[in-house]
Image: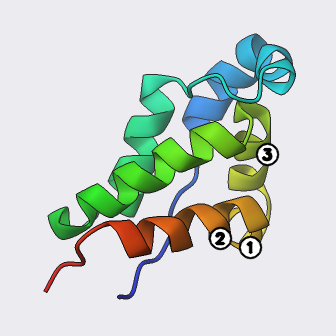
Amino acid sequence: MNIRFGNIRFGVIVASLVGILAIQAHAAPQSPYPPSLVKSFMQGCASDPGYNDFCQCTIESLQKSMSLYDFIELGNAEGNALENDERFISATNGCLSKVKQPD
């Protein structure tokens, strides 16, 4: 399975969310992410419809383990900061074992 997350960038969404949500999200790590951010993640992750279940599982797991503030910060960092974060790795590995992989 070859999945790339490098195209996940949240510039427009972040610009509208950071001022409003960053402080609140930092204080509430298990609050769900805004629907627009989840949609952006899903569009970047599930470029092949066969990965929808995996991507949905991943974003749901991340919402439980990573604050919105951390998710935004890592998503906008240079390089592959999000993909190299232990919480992200744990979420994706857990989901790989739970969902049926596309043929």
**What amino acid is found at the position of numbered circle 2 in the picture?**
Ile
Residue 84 image label: 1
Amino acid type indicated by mark 3: Glu
Which quadrant of the view contains residue 6? bottom right
Q: Please tell me the numbered disc located at residue 69.
A: none
Identify residue for label 2.
Answer: 89
Left or right side of 50 for 43? right
> Which is more foreground, mark 3 or mark 2?
2
Separation (CA) of disc 3 from disc 1: 13 Å
Residue 43 at least partly seen: yes
Image depth: mark 3 or mark 1 in front:
1
Q: Secondary structure at mark 1?
A: helix
Q: CA distance from mark 1 to mark 2?
A: 7 Å
Q: Which is closer to the viewer, label 1 or label 2?
A: 2
Residue positioned 59% across, 38% down in the render: 63
In the rendered image, the quadrant that contains the C terminus is bottom left
> Given the image, on which type of amino acid does mark 1 rest?
Asn
Q: Image point 79% across, 58% down: which residue?
A: 77
The location of residue 79, given as percent across then percent down, is 75, 73
Horizontal and vertical percent position of residue 19: 78, 16
Vertical placement of residue 57 versus 78, above or below: above
Mark 3 = which residue? Answer: 73
